Amino acid sequence: MSSVWSDRPFLIVLAAVLATALLLVVSIALPFGLSAYLANAIGQLAAFAVLALSLDLIWGYLGILSLGHGLFFGIGGYVVAMYLLKHSYEVTGKVPDFMQFMGWTTLPFYWAGFGFFSYALLVATAVTLLISGVFGYVSFRSRVGGVYFAIITQALVYVAMLLMFRNDTGFGGNNGMTGFTIIFGWPIGQRGVVIAIAAASVVALALTMLGCRLLLQSRFGVLMIAARDDEVRLRTLGYDTLLLKLAIWCLSALIAALAGMLYVPQVGIINPRLLSPDVSLEIAVWVAIGGRGHLIGAVIGAVLVNALKFWLSAAAPDLWPFILSGLIVLVAFVFPNGLVDLAKFKLHRPLISRQLSSETPELR
Amino acid sequence: MRWLCAILMCLVAAFAVTRSCAAEAIDRADLVAKVCGDAAAMGEAGRALIRIAAEGSPEDRNWAATVVRAAIDRKLSCDATGAGSRSPLLSLKNRALFETADAAFALRGSPDPARRSSALRTLERQAASLPEQLFDAAIHDETDPGLKAQISAVAQGAALNSPDLAKRIAAVGRIAKNPDRRTLALVTPLLNDPAYAANPEFKRAVDSASAAIHRGITIGDILATVYNGLSFASILFMAAIGLAVIFGLMGVINLAQGEFIMLGGYVTWLVQESLRVIAPGLVEWYLIIAVPVVFLVTAAIGIVLEAILLRHLYRRPLMSLLATWAVSLFLINLVRVTFGTQNLQFVTPSYITGGVPVIGDFIFTWNRMFAIAFAAVTLILTWGLMRLTPLGLNIRAVTQNRTMAGCIGIAVRRVDMLAFGLGSGLAGLAGLALAPIYSVNPQMGQNFIIDSFMVVVLGGVGTIAGTIVAALGIGQINVLIEPVWGAVAAKVIVLLMIIGFLQWRPEGLFAVKGRRK
């Protein structure tokens, strides 16, 4: 794989992301510039793009499709929601809604420490690593892969959703958690704060892109692609693919959790719907539409599909599912590698080179 | 009304004369005299009337019922007996007696079940003081099964509290023959009864009855669990068998399988509605009539889907996964836009309502039996199709080795198409079996899809035996765990068990032996 600095399409997208970040940072200080609403939408799109990157990392570059990435997204989201709720509770004294619903006067014991962000970060990392590590180890060890793996991850996120729908778990039950007022001591609804969170999300997206790109051009990245293209041969050559797959799987889960932590403060609510199998499937759809096996494909797919969704679910809510299913079928037939295939048409050559699209074989 | 009563009294007198010679016959004149007598005599008359209700012949009962009704309504004129023109006034105590008698007659003779039921409620309060023949006779005559059970329950309660110890022991023994939670509630208080400590025979009877009831309840609960598990498993099997055939054949997981179940439910509903218009007499039988329609319609939709979409994605199973999800999204929303999101209303046919109480609290319900029988028939037909027909032979050949099967001249693509149609049709039939016992709405398929995937993953690819065993196992485990830790815990535990199991046999229970890929 060519060096980052000679990969023009990647650099163009990265520059666009950085420019957006700059625009947002400038808007914090200035009274004009982006409105809070627009900034919030951009921030959410950035969080989705990070999530899509996490899935692209294992699906596009390791050939493992997870239909349960919403689980890790949800873990990040729930942990950050717990932090926001506890923090808001400590600062304002406003009792969280779900405690009132359940008639509780104190938070359950496992909420202790969630008033500190560093602790919440630690918990999110630990829980994500624990679940992804254990699940990944048992699955990859017994060489569960392909469709089997996809189905089991889907069942995993489904079970998590059922668990979270219970009201007695202390995580808000079916109403979820909402009513966040304070983040790091700042009121969360203020324009400056909203834009700052969005800017942080876009910066996180840029860093994730860069990090993934650097990982992919390292020896480790070469091994990943080798494992995707012919795992048996790689094993025969003496590489331990279990460790390789497990490491990337856990890394991907962590990135998904990061996306969740960026997403929830911006929408201001988390509930078990986020863990429904449909949401996780949609992540795979973003990546498929944008182009698997290309980092920019994941980013473009997530941003385009979600921007379209934001617009259409307001303009024509009944139409959206039909358009989404149509897009998937279109991608499946016309652009097997997603929108990156547009490079086949000379018109778009400056943006995405032909060399790039021929670099990865048509994925299974 | 007065003249009516007078005529009645004349009739009474006439009857009394003509029938006084019969040995069994009651002395009507004497009874009437008592009814017209003082308070003590009227009390005696009340008790006598209750006896008539219990033991009397139908004519006697009819006659006595009129007398009682007249006495309560103060329409009884005592002229005919020569005691002076007056209507006897019931004292409070006697009024209660007469009302009991009235209820007893109503229980025996009223043609209206609601009246009999209300009479039973009146009698229930003083059941212990009533003659037991009253209830025995009423149980014997009763035609309504629900009311019959209620009467026997009251009778049992009465016998248990009867002052006669022998009767109580007999009653305890009788009760133990129908063990369930209700009889347990009847017997348990007897352990604190003074007679339990005083009389060893009574103690023995109560102890053995209590043990028998406990045993019966345990057996009933076990049977009920097995039965519920079996019915759940049969639904799982129906949902999963099509999935397993398709997965085994083409390596494609059809995420739209749940929507074929949903479509099956909707086609069943459409059949029911068109029967309502075309042949209202046959609406009851819509479940049977819909079988071929549902199978053909869902199979046709499946074949179309295969021909225009999945055919082109066989080399890319993960992409076909997404494509079938797109189809599922499309179908759900199409149905939602066309029919709305509300649950469909189904006629519950008489042949799947109710059930047979077997033992304990286990009721052999016909609607569950329908699902089980339906799954069994489907299983036999599918098995026959796979084993005995040329198509089945081809499907098995392509499943084992697609390239080789193509080389020896099997039309692989055609087999794919037909198998996909078969799988979709079977899913549609699952929707049909679900229609009378489950809510049919656009989202219903989503609730089965993950469970049926688990069945396929656990059972192994493309084997009917694996699908059966996995469906039975998952169904039973779910039903076993559910009452203890709840439905969510059941799902979590089942999933963890499957992941653990795949450690041991990654290819599923009944994997075809071969090289590990």
Image (tube, rainbow, N blue to C red):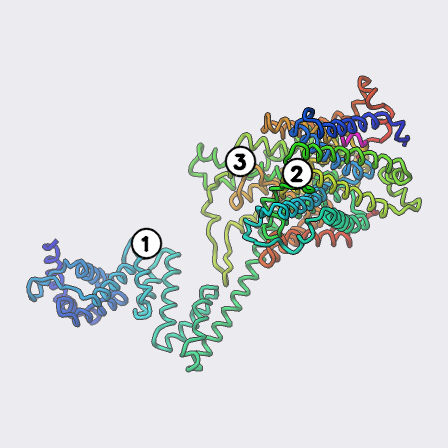
| Residue B160 appears left or right of A185 | left
Mark 3 vs mark 2, foreground winner is: 2
Q: Nearer the viewer, residue B311 or A256?
A: A256
| Residue B194 appears left or right of B295 | left
Q: Which residue is mark 2?
A: A278
The chain under label 1 reads B
What amino acid does circle 3 point to? Answer: Thr
What amino acid does circle 1 point to? Answer: Pro
Q: Is residue B45 above or below residue B372?
A: below
**Picture quarter containing residue A290?**
top right
> What's the mark number on residue B341?
3
The chain under label 3 reads B
> What's the mark number on residue A162?
none
Provide the secondary structure element on which disc 1 rests.
helix
> What's the mark number on residue B113?
1
What amino acid does circle 2 point to? Answer: Asp
Provide the secondary structure element on which disc 2 rests.
helix
* Tag 3 and tag 2 share a subunit: no
Task: Give the residues in magenta.
Answer: A294-299
